[in-house]
Amino acid sequence: MIRWILFILFVVLIEVYAFQSVRTVTKLKWAQYGYLALSAIILLYIIYSFTQFDRSVGQTKQTLFTMGLLLITYLPKILLTVVLLGEDIVRVICGGIRAFMGDSQQPFLPDRRRFVSLTAMGIAAIPFLSLLYGMTKGKYNFRVIKQTLFFPDLPENFDGVTITQISDVHSGSFDNKEKIEYAVDLVNQQESDIILFTGDIVNTHAEELHPWIDTFRRIETPALGKYSVLGNHDYGEYVTWRSEKEKQDNFDAIKDLHRQIGFKLMLNEHIKLKRGTDEIALVGVENWGKGFKQAGDLKKASEGLGEKDFKILMSHDPSHWEYEVKNNNNNYHLTLSGHTHGLQFGIEIPGVIKWSPVQYVYKQWAGLYENLGRYLYVNRGFGFHAYPGRVGIWPEITVLTLKKGEKVS
């Protein structure tokens, strides 16, 4: 009950300050009343949508839209509130000084300045426009990111081998077939030697991929094949099921989706990839995440492999690398993960800045990481979840080239 009271007070505070900025900027009553009416309609819709959330269904197009509407409405208003609250602190201090000095000619609180309100609106427009772009364009702004990695012990015949990685498809969120077909074409255009998919094929239910099976089946099978692992969303643990059998049937159907789109799903196992007389091991584990499902069994998946075997590990959650892989005596040369999506929000300018709020939760959250010659690559994700957009952290298709030798500085 206390949490609800605090939440209501927080919303009231934000709405009061947001209206103050509108009232300071314009004296037109119809504009002020129109703003109040629109704000009330949006707030009531958001409340209604959240009350209609069905735990047995999980995320839907409506919940995606509602989350986007919530962010695009209240994040700008929160910034407005911060600026105007700062102005109020200054107003109170100035009023206190005048009162202390005995100045009774002016009111205790100076009038709110129009310039400050306009500045606050300008600041609030940045997240508003960014989130709007993210929902309309950014979520399908696919980028191909290429990286070359050097390994002194890479077998000779694998020198120059290329890997295309995709991750976090979240097919239940898609709403534009043309854009997804374009992304699949991008995957095929890379003409890599192997394609690896590191989990989260759906949000929850197997049927989410059904409209997209033919599209993803178009991903061409390269010389070394197509392989995949499961992600945390593939276990159906974020909804309420009527029975354990229903949950298990859905899980079995999700696993079969990989077969239907031509991927070999790896469940705590490994295979040997061969080129000429050389071979490397591809290891695939089920999801293992700090604070998430830990079905991954690295020991089982690596049975029969030794320290000197060159190994590529597919593990959905990058926290697995941090806690179990990077210092493992079995020497996993390259780990491929996803999961974080880069929070679908951040700022990335190569060589200048790389920031997202998710970095305060995950040490490794996007791109390439290295520890004692062992590498982790975290894909930023193919799809989107919860927030129906992307801002600054764009959907990614990764292309890795493996080279034999030492990296030249």
Image (spheres, grey):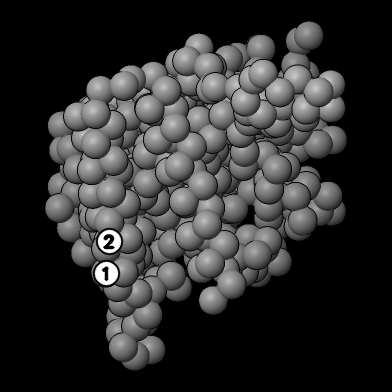
Dot label at residue 234: none
Residue located 24% across and 29% down the image: 29
Vertical position of residue 117 compared to residue 305: above or below: above
Residue located 34% across and 90% down the image: 243
Instruction: Indicate the quadrant containing the N terminus: top left, top right, bottom left or bottom right.
Output: bottom right
Q: Are there few (<14), some (14-19), or many (20+) residues within 10 Å of tag 2? A: some
Residue located 84% across and 21% down the image: 101
In the rendering, at what x and y percent does residue 282 appear? 56, 49
- Type of amino acid at the residue the image marks with label 1: Gln
User: Can residue 156 be seen at all in this image of the molecule?
Assistant: no
Total numbered labels placed on residues in the image: 2
User: Can residue 350 be seen at all in this image of the molecule?
Assistant: yes
Looking at the image, which is closer to me, 282 or 10? 10
Tag 1 secondary structure: loop
Q: Which residue is mark 1?
A: 52
Vertical position of residue 113 compared to residue 2: above or below: above
In the rendering, at what x and y percent does residue 84 appear? 56, 29
- Type of amino acid at the residue the image marks with label 2: Ser
Q: In this rendering, would 144 be left or right of 184?
A: right
Q: Which residue is mark 2?
A: 49
Instruction: Indicate the quadrant containing the C terminus: top left, top right, bottom left or bottom right.
Output: top right
In the rendering, at what x and y percent does residue 268 appear? 56, 65
In the rendering, at what x and y percent does residue 360 appear? 70, 43
Q: In this rendering, would 103 be left or right of 100?
A: left
Image quadrant assignment for residue 355: top right
* C-alpha gap between disc 1 and disc 2: 5 Å
Looking at the image, which is closer to me, 350 or 266? 350
Residue located 32% across and 51% down the image: 43
Tag 2 secondary structure: helix
Is label 1 in contact with label 2 (beta carbons under 8 Å)? Answer: yes
Q: Are there few (<14), some (14-19), or many (20+) residues within 10 Å of tag 1? A: few
